[in-house]
Amino acid sequence: MVRWDLPPSQMKPDETELRRLKILAVDDEESNLLLLTRILESEGYTDIHVCSDATLVPEMFVTIAPDLVLLDLHMPKIDGFELMERLAPLSGGASDVPFLVLTADATDETKRRALALGARDFLTKPLDRVELLLRVRNMLQVKHLQDQLREQNRFLEDRVIDRTRDLDRARMEILDRLALAAEYRDDQTQEHAWRIGRTCSLVGHGLGLPEPEVDLIARAATLHDLGKIGISDSILLKPGRLTDDEFDVIKTHTTIGAGILAGSTSPLMRLAERIALTHHERWDGTGYPLGLEGDAIPLAGRITAVSDTFDALTHARPYKGAWSVDAALHEIVGQSGRQFDPAVVAAFCALDHPMLLSSARGELS
């Protein structure tokens, strides 16, 4: 057996494995095939297939999937050159299954043509038994090692895929925990971030956005209020109306969140930064912190603004009670073209609004 923990130079198959590999011999002379079979069997090779009719070889090649082809060049109907051309696409390319050419024509022109078509080596007839067995063994060993390396590469690729999937899950879990940290103090349900993500996803679909973009917005939107971790409890949890100075402090959660998320090379984190910064901008340009107007506000920020407002209105907070779904929807529609992008409001209005209040935990996994 091949050791997967060894470098390729040490991954040598044993003789038993080599002798089980499949050999296909093609020659129009039955006597030559008989001789080849006896020589190979005497050396212990157990899976030998022969064919004297070249027209049958392509079908045999597919059925048998040989590890080595011993091929005569000069045959009636289809010669060895044409046969190699036909077999090349079936074998995954001329360099995949090796061809050992057996011919009495050892001219340079013949060798060059055969090599160009995929031949790996030549033996001149009449055949020398020892030389034949050495060439067969060497070519099978190379083929076996190539197959093992290919299998090892597939194994390693699968490991990389599994590891990447594990890392992706870990990254998503970290993002979920960051989102939870942002909502932990002023969201009794501790599900605000996940509901926002789900609503953003539904609105994104309603706007006809591509699925990858929808997924990215839904994930990034869960971090929209990350900056709240920088706001003191005396202001964030104040049960009464905020003073102007206190409201100015609340506004800084946009820049705090964007600052925490800034500098990443991840598309998800870069989008989360833009959402954190712009989800309180207004369509009419009177929002904060930048006073952006209309399409200057990133679409993800506009989608999050509507989703966030609906969820905030329909859930109790320290400073207010929960609004009814109808009252919240009426407020959002009334702010279309003022606070919110009319196209986003239209997509939001088409949703099942009572469903938006249900648990969304785990839906973005």
Image (tube, helix red, strand yellow):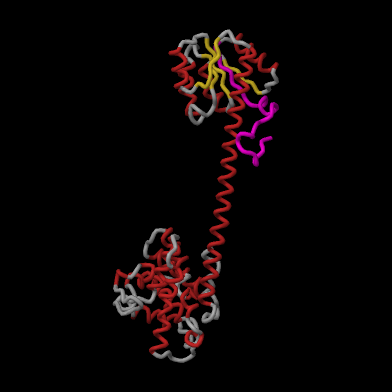
Please state if 298 lies on the left or on the right of 117 as rendered: left
Q: Quadrant of residue 36?
A: top right
Total count of labels: 0
| Residue at horizontal 59 percent and vertical 10 percent from the top | 127
On the image, the x and y values in percent for residue 189 come to 55, 78
Residue 176 lies left or right of residue 265; in this view the side is right
Work out which quarter of the rendered image holds the N terminus and state it. top right
Residue 100 at x, y percent in the picture: 55, 19
- Residue 109, horizontal then vertical, whole percent: 43, 13
The question of residue 299 being in magenta is answered with no
Is 18 rendered above or below residue 27? Answer: below
Say whether residue 99 is left or right of residue 323: right
The verdict on residue 13 being magenta is yes
Above or below residue 62? Residue 25 is above
Q: Quadrant of residue 138?
A: top right
Magenta region: 1-28
Residue situated in front as seen by the camera: 41 or 248: 248
Which quadrant of the figure contains the C terminus?
A: bottom right
Along the line of sight, the residue nearer the viewer: 329 or 99: 99
Name the residue at 55% across, 45% down: 157
Picture layout, residue 80 above or below residue 158: above
Q: Residue 313 location, x and y as percent? A: 44, 81
